[in-house]
Image (tube, rainbow, N blue to C red):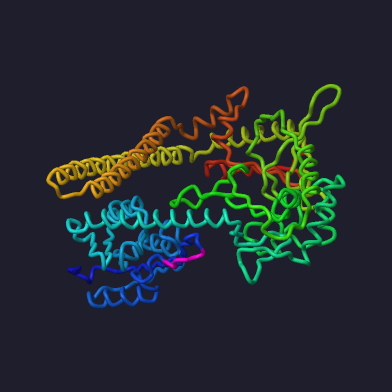
Amino acid sequence: MITIANPEKYVAGLYERLSNENIELGNGEVMVTNEDEKESGSISTQKIFLRNFCKDNNIKVYDDYTDDGVSGATFDRPAFNRMIKDIEDKKINLIAVKDLSRFGRLSSKISYYLEEFFIEKGVRFIAITDDIDTGHIETSEEMVQFKSFFNEWFLRDTSRKVRNGKKTRAKEGKVMTIYPTYGYKKDPLDYNHYIIDQDIAPIVKRIFMFARKGKTPTEISRILTKEKALVPSEIVGNTHTRKSETRIGWNRNTVKRILQNVTYLGWVSNGNTKKINYKSKKTMVMPKEDRIIVKGMHTPIIDEETFNIVQDMIKSRTSTRVKTYDWLLKGLIYCKECGKKLSIVPQKNNIKTNFYLRCNTYARNTHLNFCTPHSNNLEKVTNFVIEQIKSRCKDFLNEEKYTQIANASKEKIIEDKFNLKNEILILEKKIKDINKKIDKLYEDKYNGLFENEDFSRIYSKHIDSRKQIEERIKQLKKSEEKEDLSVDIKELVENFINMKEITRTILISLVNKIEISENKEITIYYKFNILNKGKKDKKIQNVG
């Protein structure tokens, strides 16, 4: 039972979490887990439970932090992030949860917060029903290790069941997308089956007809935009992933995506993307040969002959760029109007090849007039930018306040080095502690306190934790080496002024980005705030 001595010194943050996740078993049966809701309780039940605990122990409550419908596989949660900020702002110094699984299900993250972050911030952590209290660490440490391992195992097991269920349903040809494909609707009698959307299917047929007659995706997109045909995101509802469609109408990529979609043949294609693992939100696009395609699952909109002819025409127009250009300002210069990076276009004449800057937003949607061409001579722009940077560097060296700023920069470098070394020392101590736990684990195994299966699980967990810490130490040591190689602002500025031929290395070390406007107005943004102060770098210059 958890008891709190001196409760008056604590201000509590109460954290509640519940994710609503269904495990599809793949045989038509669905097991509703709600992450074991029977055990965890609803959000309202958690709040009452935590409030009663604080009331019984005379602990002041600052606020509730509630993440409803958020998985324990991620620690990037709105309420959780707000709670962490309040900890850093010293508004709370005690975190209470109903049980450890409500806090999260990744053992590595749990170890970081309970064994590092909360300790450094002076925060006490309590998981009430698991009897975990970092205020009595000698009674909590082993329980945290065991519970966090079990909670992550549950997450991994749930992920495996969901994955197997989806694979089974995919082989059955079930539609598994949240949003229907443009031209189809979800069958009200079977949510995993498509029926034709009679209002939209004619648009799809026209797109394929145009393509079969030789029109390019760009030409087709212009026709559809002019006719104000509804874009896919307006019909199927996925505006969060297709914001550009709702903003600018049809574009070549939208048309090409439709022209290459086998769904219009009556096929169902599943496994087009794959989540990297249960710990990550990132997904990767799967090769076509690894996707699960089942034919004849719904009424086709396009016949196979038309579809194949269109694919051949797309392939005939697809070319691979055989030459790329490296240029000094590459990746640094942006369009002021739309914020996109500018690219270059070569123009050959009898004497030489000239390069001109171009806004890609304008180039891709010229007919929509969303931006301007920014047709500026690259050589003139580059020379002008270098002159402006040199001028700013010379002014900087002449400023009287340089010494004070330079000293402050050096002090910051020293402070950063100290923090790096301190974190490395803390992590190295953690590795020693893990090694001791492994040694004790072997001893307990030898004395018959563990079965082989339990020993293997706990041992693997310790080894994984040690590998993660060792990797972090490597990263920190690399950062430490980079700090040792760093130079102060004055040295960078002097090198830039004295350099006969400017390199990208030194340019990138000084400049964050460069903007050029429709009116040929250039603004240079430096990486060091002191260089952004004082003399303005915005100029009007004929760089066409």
Left or right, residue 486 beside residue 93: right
Q: Position of residue 141 (x, y in %)?
A: 22, 55
**What residue is shown at x 57% (from left), y 50% (from top)?**
271
**What residue is shown at x 71% (from left), y 60% (from top)?**
182
Q: Position of residue 40 (x, y in %)?
A: 35, 69
Is 29 inside the magenta-drawn segment?
yes
Left or right, residue 525 beside residue 90: right
Asked where in the image residue 319 lies, by quadrant, the reply is top right
Q: Is residue 427 above or below residue 321?
A: below
Q: Is residue 74 among what the camera can see? A: no
Q: Is residue 478 above or below residue 295?
A: above
**What residue is shown at x 56% (from left), y 30% (from top)?**
506
Q: Nearer the viewer, residue 354 or 409?
A: 354
Q: Nearer the viewer, residue 53 or 438?
A: 438
Query: How many numbered marks appear?
Result: 0
Residue found at the far left of this picture: 447
Q: Is residue 479 above or below residue 63?
A: above
Q: Which residues are magenta?
A: 28-33
Q: Nearer the viewer, residue 469 or 420?
A: 469
Q: Position of residue 301 (x, y in %)?
A: 77, 58
Is 133 inside the magenta-drawn segment?
no
Asked where in the image residue 376 lies, by quadrant, the reply is top right
Q: Nearer the viewer, residue 416 or 47?
A: 47
Q: Is residue 6 above or below residue 345?
A: below
Q: Position of residue 213 (x, y in %)?
A: 87, 47
Q: Is residue 310 among what the camera can see? A: yes
Q: Quadrant of the C terminus?
A: top right
